[in-house]
Amino acid sequence: MELLSVSPQLLNFYAPYDRRQRRILTLLNPTNSVVLFKVTSNAWKHYRVSPIAAKIEPYDTQEVSISLSYFDFDENKKYAHRFRIQSMYDPPDRCKSEKVLAIFLKASRCDISTLALPVNLEAKPISLSNSYVKSTPCLKKIAVERNEKLRPLCSECPTRLKMYKNTKNSEKKGFLSKLVLVGSLMGVFLTAYLQRQMMQELLMNNLFPDQGEPEDDFEEF
């Protein structure tokens, strides 16, 4: 009895194999109990898996990252890489600090469910044909898995992006122009105010010239 639902059920990798390729494996626990899982392979030296073992809560999912390291691929050689997904119910009497791998080591074989996951190593690069594009729900995920940059969806995308950047630059320049204009107006108002103060002071000096200090009329006792 399989305790976990695994997707996809076949791992495909494509040439060239001079770079790392990553695939995401999704494990679903459709039961109402906690399930433990462990990932094994017959070609560990070519792959990196994270996490190797963990637990999945009831009706929850767990993503497992499987990365194929670069290696010298031989088209004439038949590769039989495969993974095994082992799963079992979480024992109710286990210690909380006990590792999942340790639980699998002492578990009975009859308590462990095993699912085979084959690996297909394509000798040719992936082909994004029209039929493939229609049948692919998410090209972005594939590009991320292959560590490749997404290509523009249309030939006008770079032009539109450039126009968008130019619009943003124009908005920034417009803001700076407004800021300079406000600063200039404030400078004009400040200069006019200072000139008004100077003219008022000059006018008061002309109308009321200084006549010396007035003498006190008080006598000293």
Image (tube, rainbow, N blue to C red):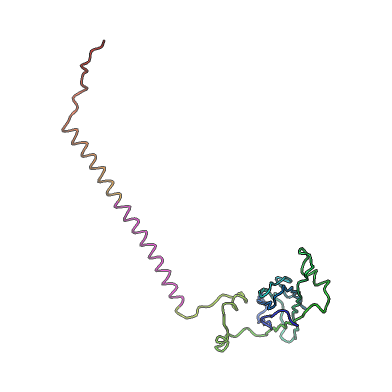
Kindly tell me whether residue 217 is visible in this rendering.
yes
**Would residue 187 appear left or right of 38 to someone viewing this image?**
left
**Would residue 110 appear left or right of 152 to someone viewing this image?**
right
Magenta-drawn stretch contains 182: yes
Residue 212 image position (x, y, % from top left):
20, 23
Q: Quadrant of the N terminus?
A: bottom right
Residue 210 image position (x, y, % from top left):
19, 27
Residue 46 image position (x, y, % from top left):
73, 75
Residue 100 image position (x, y, % from top left):
76, 69
Magenta-drawn stretch contains 45: no
Q: Quadrant of the C terminus?
A: top left
Q: Nearer the viewer, residue 20 or 133?
A: 133
Q: Which residues are magenta?
A: 157-185
Above-or-below relation of 18 to 205: below
Q: Residue at x 33, y 52 (%)?
A: 183
Q: Nearer the viewer, residue 30 or 191?
A: 30
